[in-house]
Amino acid sequence: MGMTYGVGHKSSSRRAFFSCVGLLLSASALLNCSKKSDVATTPAPAASGSAAAAPAPQKQFTAGFIYVGSKSDYGYNQAHAEGAKTLTAMGIKVREEENVPETLDVQKTMESMINLDGASVLFPTSFGYFDPHILKMAEKYPNVIFLHCGGMYTEGKHPKNVGSYFGYIDEAQYVAGIVAGMTTKTNKLGFVAAKPIPQVLRNINSYTLGAKSVNPKVTLSVIFTGDWSMPVKEAEAANSLIDQGADVLSSHVDSPKVIIETAERRGVFSTGYHASQAALAPKGYLTGAEWNWETVYKYYVDKIQKGEPFEHLLRGGFKEGFIKMSAYGPAVSDAAKAKADEAKKKFMDGTLLIYTGPLKDNAGKEVIPAGTTMAQRDIKLESMGYLVDGVKGSVH
Amino acid sequence: MSQVSPVPTSPAGASGRVPSARPASGRAARTSLLKKFEPLIISSAAIIATLLLFGVFLLLDGLNPLDVYEVMFRGAFGTWFSFQNTLQRAAPLMLTALCTALPMQLGLLVIGGEGALVVGGVSAAVMGLAMQNASPYVVLTGMLFAGAIAGGLWIALVGVLRAYRGVSETISSLLMSYIAIALMNHLVEGALRDPESLNKPATRHIGEVNMLGPIPGLDVHWGLVYGLIACLVGFVLMKRTIFGFAAAMTGGNMRAALLSGLRVRHLMVLTCFLAGAAAGTAGMIEVAAVHGRANASLVAGYGYTGILVAFVARQNPLGVIPVALLLGGIGASGGLLQRNFNLPDASVNVLQGILFMVILVSETLYGKLDLWSFARGATARKSAEAGAVA
């Protein structure tokens, strides 16, 4: 087609042109399929670590927030954007950029925020921004502070102007599982998940164990979609789980939006993840496991304003205020509320541990022997590779 | 092009339409001058029209378009940092654009650059890991060949399916992209997985010493040079060689090409190989210059943006360079639009969408735009229209 300048167009080439537009439109959907974010790992022990030499106090500064998806996605990115709003309320100048892929693009966005917006503190919020992008920029701009979500900091290996935070949100999934287990009529729960990686498996397992703690007859079916943002597959998975009899759906994807909407439309219950999706399902939304980044961001801003060193590896659960539950929906019974509140209280005072032996995986193999207890910060939980008994699904 | 059928083995029975030539006249010299500048005039007009249309969109948002364009210019070309940002973003687009622009010379619409990029990236990473004991230059050369050949074979398969089995290259290349991404996920989550990459499955790192560094004096990696060279080579090949002439002839009229004894099937497969090699090189650069390993970050949409670049460049390999810079600049300034004006990220998509639609519409102007006769009055205009209709 490119060779026909001025020779007069053949209609076939024009048709090809327009057929290309249609294909491009469908292809452009793919552009959104590559967003991956909300996972965390850390091979490092508990949330401490010696702090860096104290930087100069910065009373007023510009903070740059970078999101891998849309900041109004009812999910991972929205949870961070809500946290960013608390900075604005504290009088900090906030600059935000959304839909930034985990490529050189994010490096350039960080540099652009530093060079053109004068940002001195950056919050690149996606898990995949850390290595190599944040590490490279942190070396290049040693006076800028980079605070990453994912809990990936390793003392001695990573630059001093970097911090990484994350929360033990599987505690909140356990509580949501209790509500689901008390609410289900069919004793079948459904879970739509992105990838069978440790962080996701831990959420599925904690949710299942929470449900089983109040209702031993419960089973949970899980479907993996393969990526973090696949709305079409997520809707298909939700429908298929409902067709199989599941009457409470939960999820671990970047944005649970379509799953919650599908559940509501089909008249089944749902529990949320990342942020509150209550507005999407006024009838069927039970509760949800939410991040509470406000706590974390206030901590960092406070340290920076005072010029004090900050924790490089910052992690926490209910007790530390890193996570919270969505308000109970209308369908939650008082008995379920009582059980859930009780579990939450036990998490707060540290008396409830989710992973205690004997625990079998769903193939019948013992994964935690009797008498063994794995605490919240146990490093072995960070490389979880199994689904517990009661889950229908496979990690392979 | 519209009806998909395997290339006939012999030209017997071929009944192709020969494009009608414009009637020769005394205006020939002037017309040829106009022809030379026609793409430039129409492309510039299209860009100006895009800015006007997007300006209306901005006005509706309560913004002053001039302010916005000033910030966009600053974010894309206005400072040394911005310009390097633009150059960097343009680099992969040049290579993926060739994946569409080269086969289009033959009339093949290949939109699977994303898949070739992914396959090239994974192959390059595997080669880099296999050559850990070699010197960095040898490793990088090995990776380049691995990425280019793997990407080339990937799209060559599309060419084979088209030439020998009559499978639409557009559909097959798009579907093969999904296969490529699934294959990569399978490999990085299985056989090739670095056991330390718990929550973001990836291959092992190829090693810092083996990474492709920045161009001296610039904050832009060598991928830009690869892209420029590939565009130049593509241009010379397609516009200045017998191979390119044969490709153009096939694209103009496949049956006529067969009648002339051209080996159209070979041309198709070879051109598809070169196209895939360009996209595969882009994948190699992503691994060698940016990530150091192959993982899902390779699927960043460069392959699809490349299609847009190729079309805006009217499939001219040399035209790909400025268009990639333009789109790179839009990408570089997109962040500023969000940060300075609180516009959603989708506004950049609106701009790109308007640009693409205007370019498509402007395609219909070619051959119909006779500036000289506009100047000469109604009679001349009439004859020009008659010429265009013929």
Image (cartoon, grey):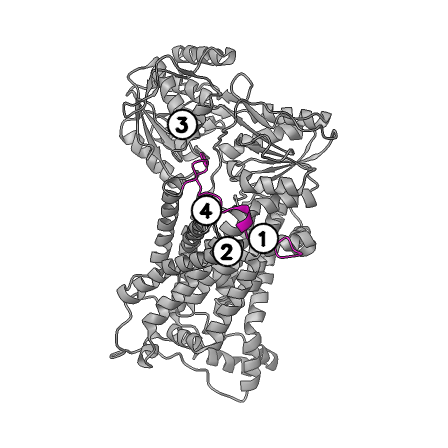
Is residue B72 depicted above or below A379 in this figure? below
Residue B2 left/right relative to A69: left
Residue type beneath disc 2: Leu
Which numbered circle lies on residue A384? 3
- Residue B215: in magenta span: yes
Residue B342 seen: no
- Residue A385: in magenta span: no
The magenta segment is B193-220
- Badge 4 crowding class, 10 Å Cα cut-off, few under 14, some 14 to 19, many 20 or more, is many
Q: Which chain carries label 1?
A: B
- Which element type, helix, strand or loop, lies under badge 2? helix
- Which element type, helix, strand or loop, lies under badge 4? loop
Residue A246 left/right relative to A313: left
Is residue B252 depicted above or below A57 in this figure? below
Residue type beneath disc 4: Ala
Which residue was labeled with disc 4?
B294
Q: Mark 3 lies on which chain?
A: A
Which residue was labeled with disc 2?
B140
